[in-house]
Image (cartoon, grey):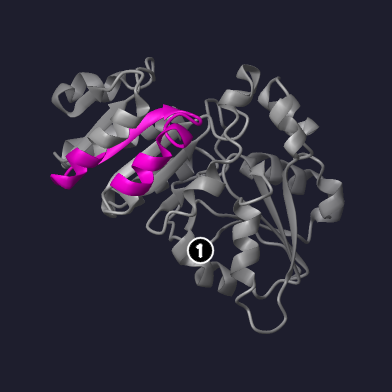
């Protein structure tokens, strides 16, 4: 995902002289294509994330579209006040880029578990959440964000995520992408972020799941609940899947959205991370399994 991000950012910068990248003294081995080609539009703010977002807001107020790049919780929770007051309140074109969503950095422990970031970022009134599930969705999200500069949060995996989509999809905020169409309206799985791959594998390998549809949601946020409610209203049961704690996450957002449906609301089943994972250390795969994310039997 990181390589897809920097490739799209570099391509965009060639067309748009207002695209800027700011990093918090990391990303080396990834960000060099941009930094080498556009040294005057690349800034290392150092290990000072709050200053990084303040700098980004200042640049954005002068007409630049700024991408702030850092790991997991550092560009979000450490900068919550700056994001709230400087970026979102003033509706500035700053994209907060968090690398290592969910438990991607699971071996580094709770300080690097990005499992409460949706809960924080989705409460910002102007914030668009971009949580791509594979490199093709990263490219789609970047194309959308470049064309629609605004306060936004781009949540990336760490590395090595496989492509589920064969080409770059066209995406619209609040409108799910169809990964697999089932033959029944009884149930649909809807994932956001990197669980796209594990849901896709499960549904393709499980006989009982052959009639179940699978949607993915790369772009969502506070202002798009009516759109997704309309898209999900035809199903009897909606299973949400996310590498985030249940409280305040993607499933909670879906619950709030379908609550707007007046009649025949679908039932919602949330498959999220158990909070016990907050005290655990291990690989992403081990922690996802320990937190119950891979237990789809309860959802079929």
Q: Is residue 149 above or below residue 111?
A: below
Q: Quadrant of residue 91?
A: bottom left
Looking at the image, which residue is at 37% across and 30% down?
69
Image location of residue 162, percent across then percent down: 57, 33
Question: Which residue lies under the disc numbered 1?
Answer: 175
Can residue 6 be seen?
Answer: no
What residue is rendered at 69% in x and 48% in y? 246
Q: Position of residue 151 (x, y in %)?
A: 34, 50
Number of other residues with Cα within 10 Å of mark 1, as a class: few under 14, some 14 to 19, many 20 or more:
many
Residue at 19% from the left image edge and 39% from the top image edge: 58
The picture places residue 120, in percent across and down from the top left corner, at 51, 46
* Residue 295 seen by the camera: yes
State the residue at coordinates (31%, 36%): 67
The answer to whether 250 appears left or right of 63 in the picture is right
Magenta stretch: includes residue 89: no
Q: Nearer the viewer, residue 167 or 196?
A: 196
Residue 118: percent from left, percent from top = 54, 46
For residue 226, side relative to residue 83 (left or right)? right
- State the extent of the magenta-drawn residues as a range: 57-86
Q: Look at the image and say whether residue 62 sits in the magenta stretch.
A: yes
Give the secondary structure at mark 1.
Answer: loop
């Amino acid at each position: 995902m990181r390589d897809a991000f920097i490739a799209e950012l570099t391509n965009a910068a060639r067309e748009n002289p207002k695209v800027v990248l700011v990093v918090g003294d990391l990303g080396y081995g990834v960000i060099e294509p941009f930094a080498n080609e556009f040294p005057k539009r690349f800034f290392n703010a150092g290990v000072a994330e709050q200053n990084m977002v303040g700098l980004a807001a200042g640049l954005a107020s002068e007409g630049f579209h700024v991408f702030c790049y850092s790991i997991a919780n550092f560009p979000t929770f450490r900068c919550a006040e700056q994001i709230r007051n400087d970026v979102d309140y003033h509706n500035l074109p700053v994209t907060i880029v968090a690398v290592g969503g969910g438990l991607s950095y699971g071996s580094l422990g709770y300080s690097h578990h990005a499992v409460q970031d949706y809960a924080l970022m989705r409460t910002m009134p102007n914030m668009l959440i971009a949580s791509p599930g594979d490199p093709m969705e990263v490219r789609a999200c970047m194309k959308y964000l470049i064309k629609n500069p605004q306060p936004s949060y781009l949540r990336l995996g760490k590395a090595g995520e496989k492509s589920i989509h064969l080409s770059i999809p066209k995406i619209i905020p609040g409108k799910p992408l169809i990964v697999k169409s089932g033959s029944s309206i009884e149930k649909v799985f809807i994932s956001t972020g990197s669980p796209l791959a594990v849901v896709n594998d499960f549904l393709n390998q499980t006989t009982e799941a052959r009639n179940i549809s699978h949607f993915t949601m790369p772009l969502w946020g506070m202002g798009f609940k009516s759109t997704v409610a309309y898209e999900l209203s035809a199903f009897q049961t909606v299973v949400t899947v996310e590498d985030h704690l249940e409280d305040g996450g993607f499933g909670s957002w879906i619950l709030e959205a379908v609550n707007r449906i007046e009649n025949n609301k679908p039932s919602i089943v949330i498959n999220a991370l158990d909070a016990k994972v907050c005290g655990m250390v291990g690989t992403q795969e081990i922690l996802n399994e320990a937190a119950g994310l891979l237990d789809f039997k309860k959802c079929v």
